[in-house]
Image (spheres, rainbow, N blue to C red):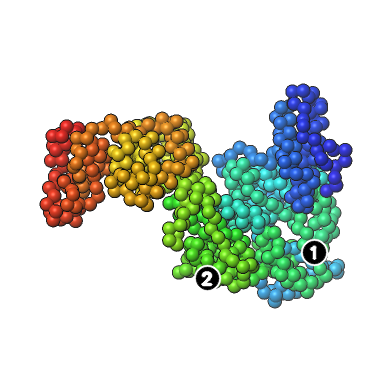
Amino acid sequence: MEEPQDNPYVRDPPTDFTPPEDLEEPEAKTQIELLREAIRYHDHRYYRQADPAISDRAYDRLFERLETLEDAFGLRSETSPTQRVGGEPIDELETVEHVRPMRSIDSSGEQTDVRDFDDRVRDRLAEAGYEGPIRYLCEPKFDGLSVELVYENGALERAATRGDGERGDDVTENVRTTRSVPLELRGDYPSFLAVRGEVFMPKEAFQAYNRDRIERGEDPFANPRNAAAGTLRQLDPSVTAERPLDCFVFGILDDGGTGFETRLEEHRAVDRWGFHTDGHTEPVEDIDGAIAFRDRMLDRRDDLGYEIDGTVIKLDQLDACERLGSTARAPRWAFAYKFPARTEETTVRDIVVQVGRTGRITPVALLDPVEVSGVEVSRATLHNPEQIAELGVNVGDTVRIKRAGDVIPYVETVVDHAEDGSFELPDRCPVCESPIEREGPLAFCTGGIGCPAQLRRAIQHYASRSGLDIEGLGEKAVDQLLEAGLVESLPDLYTLSETELAGLDGWGETSAANLLSELEASKRPPLSDFLAALGVPGVGGTTAGDLARYFGTLEAVLEADEDELRDVEGIGPKTAAEIREFFESDRNRDVIATLRDRGIDPESAETADDALEGLTFVFTGSLEGWTRDEAQSLVERHGGSATSSVSGNTDYLVAGDNPGRSKREAAADNDVPTLEESDFRRLLSEYGVEP
């Protein structure tokens, strides 16, 4: 693409712009056209030549200026570079008919089949009386998703997936966000043009994208092809715009009869018109040249920035292709010479740490896709830091992959070390920057409720019976809230609206109103319930009650040092250190502060009396009209203790329906009185405690 002349935004562009309100519309129109021209040029330099002419910051300023002017003067255009940021979400993809059939290609990995293809081409052309030359055009076989791109008067009109070859999904809005696809053609292009291309995700971008997904606690894509396909079929174009897609164009479906004689001429033309084409496409004189091309590409395969799984051999002369025609499934003038599948040995491209729902850190090796026992594998779990050190594995190493039980991929051994040493676990969580702590061979993020990777589990626990017992906020509901983007942190639960909730699949106004009512009711929990709901390491219901009774207020618990925590009965040095570390975390304190800003005000334990002081209860079986947790909390709020097991220090075992046998036997062995639920309620009344 030639550099635009007399355009001030191409080289050392000014970024100190006149406010839009000080511009007349003609002046704004001129600036908009210059900005569009410059940005298209910069996109070409960046995405096609990998040779940017200006800094990213300068580019962003030009792009923002163009958006500002288009909005201020109402001058948006479908072909403007600003339209690549994504449009409105849609309900579903429509199906459209292709301009010309998009057939698949016969393929094989055997050289004899390739030579048989050449024999068939020559025999059929001889039978048809063709006397011209027989040459081939060879190109890589891209491992992505085929698309049809349709242009009218040089502007992108439509984009569709291959589908069944006759009809495909309309993905126009998503393709508009792919910067290597021109929204406007350049040069001497035909008034109507339909081309075929392949949308793909570059290797480096794929690994980086998977790394981000794993660090966010999401499942990675299996390979770049799946990543491209899933991205292109997104219903929200703004999601597609955020993902690193690229597109090579390699063929013309319909050009309105421009009169090209060879596929090589077509290839050069689509490059002139502004499409991204692969630089390895090469004409050869005969089938031996095509086989040699394939062998060279196989050697270069690992050095390419994108995945290929073979080469495509096409008859170059278009009139000869016309005579050969096609079967119902595939053209007779093309053949794909496939590469052998990568088996077992591959390269480690990256090692990323995955943060599980419990905070456990798991190292994961991201691999060049490799076939293992008939399944394509692109990642392998490394389990823990000790295994990494034992294997001596690091980024860049060639490794052998196996599948445990033919299911779970793992690194069996390092075949070739790229450098000395092994991968070392980071000191801090890649998601929330909290310290990572080791427990034997395992490692854990200490971020707790402040770590986004642990958010799903944190919300589920917060709403569970062990927490604040928020009805209607089970696992499915939590997943829906997270997937819809309605909740990005624990306090976001208290900003939900009835309209947002009612719009979720399977919800309605009644269920939405019920959940909001439950959330409102949870704003004044007993201090012990709130402490248990936070998921503090080592703090279950009993310990939460002990903390609440000892310190009385949330502020006192937050400020308690380790020595003070160890003064609480049942809390040892390890648990005291974990509690202190949890509450010293800036992220956790921010979450708690935001919860309080949104109305969460735990009841101080000081407001309860000490009527049951000195009495220890154990509960077994199910109670009528209340949960065991509620009964335990009641006892603790009035100075008593509730423990999980019967001992000589237990005063009463409270037995509901279907009581546990072992606790009853332990009570008998320790001469501990057993109370039925009615007896327990009567005892509470005697001490002045209302159940």
Q: Position of residue 412 (x, y in %)?
A: 52, 70
Numbered badge on residue 263: none
As measured in the structure, the alpha-carbon distance from the residue carrying label 2 to the one carrying label 1 is: 40 Å
Q: Secondary structure at mark 2?
A: strand
Q: Position of residue 239 (x, y in %)?
A: 60, 44
Residue toward you, 539 or 215: 539
Q: Position of residue 619 (x, y in %)?
A: 21, 46
Q: Is residue 167 visible?
A: no
Residue toward you, 53 or 177: 53
Marks 2 and 1, the one that precedes in the sequence: 1
In this rendering, which labeled residue sits more in front, label 2 or label 1?
2
Q: Residue at x 43, y 40 (%)?
A: 506
Q: Which residue is mark 2?
A: 412
Report the amino acid beneath label 1: Glu
Residue 676: image quadrant is top left
Report the amino acid beneath label 2: Glu
Q: Residue at x 70, y 59 (%)?
A: 305
Q: Is residue 200 visible?
A: yes
Q: Which residue is mark 1?
A: 282
Residue 604 to residue 383: above or below: above
Q: Residues within 10 Å of mark 1 (few under 14, many from 20)?
A: some
Q: Position of residue 678 (x, y in %)?
A: 14, 40
Q: Where does the C terminus fall, quadrant-wise?
A: top left
Residue 381 to residue 509: above or below: below
Q: Residue at x 77, y 32 (%)?
A: 16
Q: Residues within 10 Å of mark 2 (few under 14, many from 20)?
A: some
